[in-house]
Image (spheres, helix red, strand yellow):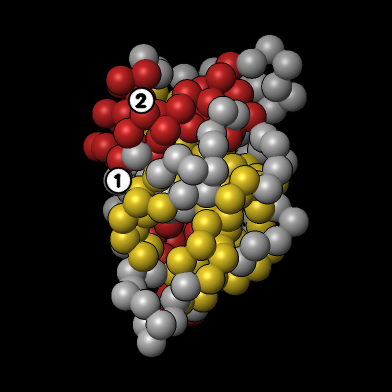
Amino acid sequence: MIAIIKYKAGNIASVSNALDRLGGRYFFAETPEELESARAVVFPGVGHAGAAMESLQAFGVDEWLKQTTKPVLGICVGMQLLYESSTEGNTIGLGVIPGSLQKFDENLEKVPHMGWNTLKQLKDHPLINNIERDQHLYYVHSYYAPVNEFTLASCDYIQEFAAVVAKDNFMGVQFHPEKSGKVGSLVLQNFLEFVYSTTNKYVTAG
């Protein structure tokens, strides 16, 4: 089954509803012991990066995430915390993906970046199978991740930023797939197919 991390910054209701629509089997997990029994992990997040990190640390989930080899999908703040740091509250992240998040320049456009925007696909990956660059996804964020070697797809708002990332068993999306209609559902479906694929080297029992 899929574990959805349950913590103070997790938008678990909309994520679980989206998995319900896809027929995905899941449970909510708060501790490393609960997460260890899962086949894969969805790491949602909304709000302030610092508060989210503190909530993970309260149960030791941060250290478990750094070490797990299970497939992990970070959503919004969940993706941002995969990076080394964020200037939002000078937050130290999990350090899974190199780079630091910066705030959009409020002198250039309205911040946060909120609403529908498209992708610029850079690399092939199972998570974004059949996702086209002209399809729209829903974003809500004030801080952006840099484009680097682990960026699968970028988006443009004020400047180019990482919208989909992957490194080893870790994947992340800056947009909210659970709020992005059919296209977002396809991203989640792709994740489920990746997790349960017999050729996926990251598949574990659970």
> Disc 1 and disc 2: Cα gap in Å?
13 Å
* Residue 149 lies in quadrant: bottom right
Q: Pinpoint residue 45: horizontal percent, then vertical percent.
A: 38, 51
- Residue in front for this viewpoint, 90 or 66: 90
Residue that appears at 30% across and 20% down: 21
170 in relation to 205, above or below: below
Vertical position of residue 50 compared to residue 96: above or below:
below
- The spot of residue 51 in percent (x, y) is 36, 66
Looking at the rendering, which quadrant does residue 171 occupy?
A: top right
Q: Give above or below for 84 relative to 185.
A: below
**Mark 1 element type:** loop
Task: State the residue at coordinates (49%, 43%).
Answer: 134
Residue 189 x/y as whole percent: 47, 24
Direction from residue 9 to residue 102 in the image, left or right: right
Amino acid type at circle 2 is: Leu
Residue bearing the label numbered 1:
11
For the C terminus, give its image quadrant. Answer: top right
User: Residue beneath label 2, please?
Assistant: 19
Mark 1, residues whose alpha carbon is within 10 Å: few (<14), some, or many (≥20)? many
Q: Which residue occupies the foreground of this view, 104 or 91?
A: 104
The answer to which of marks 1 and 2 sits earlier in the sequence is 1
Q: Residue reaching furthest bottom?
A: 107
* Amino acid at circle 1: Asn
Of 48 and 184, nearer the camera is 184
Q: Count up the numbered dots.
A: 2
Residue 60 in view of the camera? no
Residue 187 horizontal/vertical position (percent): 48, 32
